[in-house]
Amino acid sequence: MTEEDYKQDRRQALAELIGATRDSESAYWNALLTFNAILITVFSGISLMNNEHRVTIFALILCCLLSSFLLIVNFLARREHFLEAGKSFKEVETDPRKMESFHSLNLKVFRKIRTREQIAVLLLIPEMVLILWLVFP
Protein backbone atom coordinates (compact mmCIF):
# COMPACT_ATOMS: atom_id res chain seq x y z
CA MET A 1 0.00 0.00 0.00
CA THR A 2 1.43 3.34 -1.02
CA GLU A 3 1.34 6.42 1.15
CA GLU A 4 -1.27 7.98 -1.13
CA ASP A 5 -3.47 4.87 -0.82
CA TYR A 6 -3.11 5.06 2.96
CA LYS A 7 -4.14 8.73 2.97
CA GLN A 8 -7.10 7.96 0.74
CA ASP A 9 -8.19 5.13 3.05
CA ARG A 10 -7.94 7.44 6.06
CA ARG A 11 -9.99 10.12 4.30
CA GLN A 12 -12.63 7.53 3.43
CA ALA A 13 -12.74 6.19 7.01
CA LEU A 14 -13.01 9.73 8.37
CA ALA A 15 -15.84 10.55 5.93
CA GLU A 16 -17.70 7.42 7.05
CA LEU A 17 -17.18 8.30 10.71
CA ILE A 18 -18.42 11.85 10.16
CA GLY A 19 -21.48 10.51 8.34
CA ALA A 20 -22.28 8.04 11.09
CA THR A 21 -21.83 10.73 13.74
CA ARG A 22 -24.08 13.14 11.88
CA ASP A 23 -26.75 10.46 11.44
CA SER A 24 -26.70 9.42 15.11
CA GLU A 25 -26.77 13.05 16.22
CA SER A 26 -29.79 13.72 14.01
CA ALA A 27 -31.58 10.65 15.35
CA TYR A 28 -30.88 11.79 18.92
CA TRP A 29 -32.18 15.29 18.24
CA ASN A 30 -35.25 13.83 16.50
CA ALA A 31 -35.97 11.68 19.56
CA LEU A 32 -35.73 14.70 21.86
CA LEU A 33 -37.97 16.75 19.55
CA THR A 34 -40.53 13.95 19.40
CA PHE A 35 -40.53 13.63 23.19
CA ASN A 36 -41.08 17.37 23.59
CA ALA A 37 -43.84 17.37 20.95
CA ILE A 38 -45.67 14.59 22.80
CA LEU A 39 -45.41 16.44 26.10
CA ILE A 40 -46.61 19.70 24.54
CA THR A 41 -49.58 17.95 22.93
CA VAL A 42 -50.64 15.96 26.00
CA PHE A 43 -50.29 18.76 28.52
CA SER A 44 -51.85 21.38 26.25
CA GLY A 45 -54.91 19.15 26.13
CA ILE A 46 -54.86 18.63 29.89
CA SER A 47 -54.61 22.39 30.49
CA LEU A 48 -57.85 22.89 28.55
CA MET A 49 -59.65 20.47 30.85
CA ASN A 50 -57.96 21.38 34.14
CA ASN A 51 -57.59 24.97 35.34
CA GLU A 52 -56.16 23.90 38.68
CA HIS A 53 -52.60 23.27 37.43
CA ARG A 54 -52.51 25.77 34.57
CA VAL A 55 -49.34 27.56 35.79
CA THR A 56 -47.42 24.29 36.24
CA ILE A 57 -48.53 23.04 32.82
CA PHE A 58 -47.56 26.39 31.29
CA ALA A 59 -44.07 26.06 32.82
CA LEU A 60 -43.76 22.53 31.47
CA ILE A 61 -44.85 23.56 27.98
CA LEU A 62 -42.45 26.51 28.09
CA CYS A 63 -39.53 24.18 28.93
CA CYS A 64 -40.54 21.88 26.08
CA LEU A 65 -40.81 24.76 23.63
CA LEU A 66 -37.41 26.14 24.64
CA SER A 67 -35.81 22.71 24.33
CA SER A 68 -37.42 22.17 20.92
CA PHE A 69 -36.31 25.60 19.73
CA LEU A 70 -32.69 24.89 20.69
CA LEU A 71 -32.75 21.57 18.84
CA ILE A 72 -34.27 23.13 15.73
CA VAL A 73 -31.59 25.83 15.81
CA ASN A 74 -29.02 23.01 15.97
CA PHE A 75 -30.47 21.39 12.86
CA LEU A 76 -30.31 24.71 11.04
CA ALA A 77 -26.80 25.50 12.28
CA ARG A 78 -25.55 22.06 11.25
CA ARG A 79 -27.16 22.41 7.82
CA GLU A 80 -25.64 25.85 7.24
CA HIS A 81 -22.28 24.63 8.48
CA PHE A 82 -22.22 21.72 6.03
CA LEU A 83 -23.32 23.97 3.16
CA GLU A 84 -20.55 26.47 3.89
CA ALA A 85 -17.97 23.74 4.45
CA GLY A 86 -18.88 22.14 1.14
CA LYS A 87 -18.53 25.43 -0.74
CA SER A 88 -15.13 26.27 0.69
CA PHE A 89 -13.53 22.84 1.09
CA LYS A 90 -11.66 22.75 -2.24
CA GLU A 91 -10.16 26.16 -1.55
CA VAL A 92 -9.31 25.31 2.05
CA GLU A 93 -7.78 21.93 1.22
CA THR A 94 -4.96 23.52 -0.79
CA ASP A 95 -4.05 26.38 1.59
CA PRO A 96 -2.70 25.46 5.07
CA ARG A 97 -3.56 28.89 6.55
CA LYS A 98 -7.14 28.64 5.39
CA MET A 99 -7.28 25.07 6.70
CA GLU A 100 -6.34 26.28 10.19
CA SER A 101 -9.01 28.98 10.03
CA PHE A 102 -11.50 26.40 8.76
CA HIS A 103 -10.77 24.07 11.70
CA SER A 104 -11.08 26.97 14.15
CA LEU A 105 -14.49 27.87 12.73
CA ASN A 106 -15.57 24.21 12.85
CA LEU A 107 -14.65 24.06 16.53
CA LYS A 108 -16.65 27.22 17.32
CA VAL A 109 -19.72 25.88 15.51
CA PHE A 110 -19.35 22.50 17.23
CA ARG A 111 -19.12 24.12 20.68
CA LYS A 112 -22.26 26.22 20.10
CA ILE A 113 -24.17 23.17 18.87
CA ARG A 114 -23.01 21.10 21.86
CA THR A 115 -24.00 23.87 24.29
CA ARG A 116 -27.52 24.12 22.84
CA GLU A 117 -27.82 20.33 22.92
CA GLN A 118 -26.74 20.16 26.57
CA ILE A 119 -29.23 22.86 27.55
CA ALA A 120 -32.01 20.98 25.73
CA VAL A 121 -31.11 17.80 27.61
CA LEU A 122 -30.86 19.61 30.96
CA LEU A 123 -34.35 21.00 30.37
CA LEU A 124 -35.55 17.40 30.66
CA ILE A 125 -34.95 17.65 34.41
CA PRO A 126 -37.52 20.39 35.11
CA GLU A 127 -39.85 18.75 32.59
CA MET A 128 -39.72 15.47 34.52
CA VAL A 129 -40.10 17.23 37.88
CA LEU A 130 -43.15 19.13 36.63
CA ILE A 131 -44.70 15.97 35.20
CA LEU A 132 -44.16 14.11 38.47
CA TRP A 133 -45.65 17.04 40.36
CA LEU A 134 -48.72 16.96 38.12
CA VAL A 135 -49.15 13.19 38.17
CA PHE A 136 -48.38 12.68 41.88
CA PRO A 137 -49.52 15.89 43.62
Image (cartoon, rainbow, N blue to C red):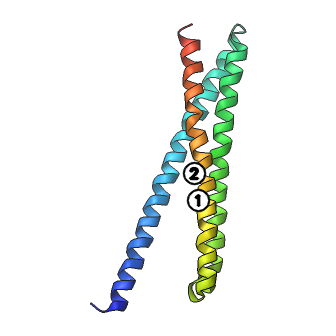
Tell which of 10 and 80 is nearer to you: 10
Percent x, y of residue 89: 60, 80
- In the image, taking residue 70 as reference, residue 14 lies left or right, namely left
- For residue 36, above or below residue 90: above
Percent x, y of residue 111: 60, 56
Q: Amino acid at mark 2?
A: Arg
Q: Secondary structure at mark 2?
A: helix
Q: Give residue 94's quadrant in the image.
A: bottom right
What residue did someone put label 2 on?
Answer: 114
Q: Label 2 neighbourhood size at 10 Å, few (<14), some (14-19), many (20+)?
A: few
Q: Label 1 neighbourhood size at 10 Å, few (<14), some (14-19), many (20+)?
A: some
Residue 9 visible? The answer is: yes
Tag of residue 110: 1
Tell which of 118 and 97 is nearer to you: 97
Q: Give residue 13's quadrant in the image.
A: bottom left
- For residue 45, above or below residue 12: above
Percent x, y of residue 46: 65, 16
The residue positioned 59% from the left and 80% from the top of the image is 99
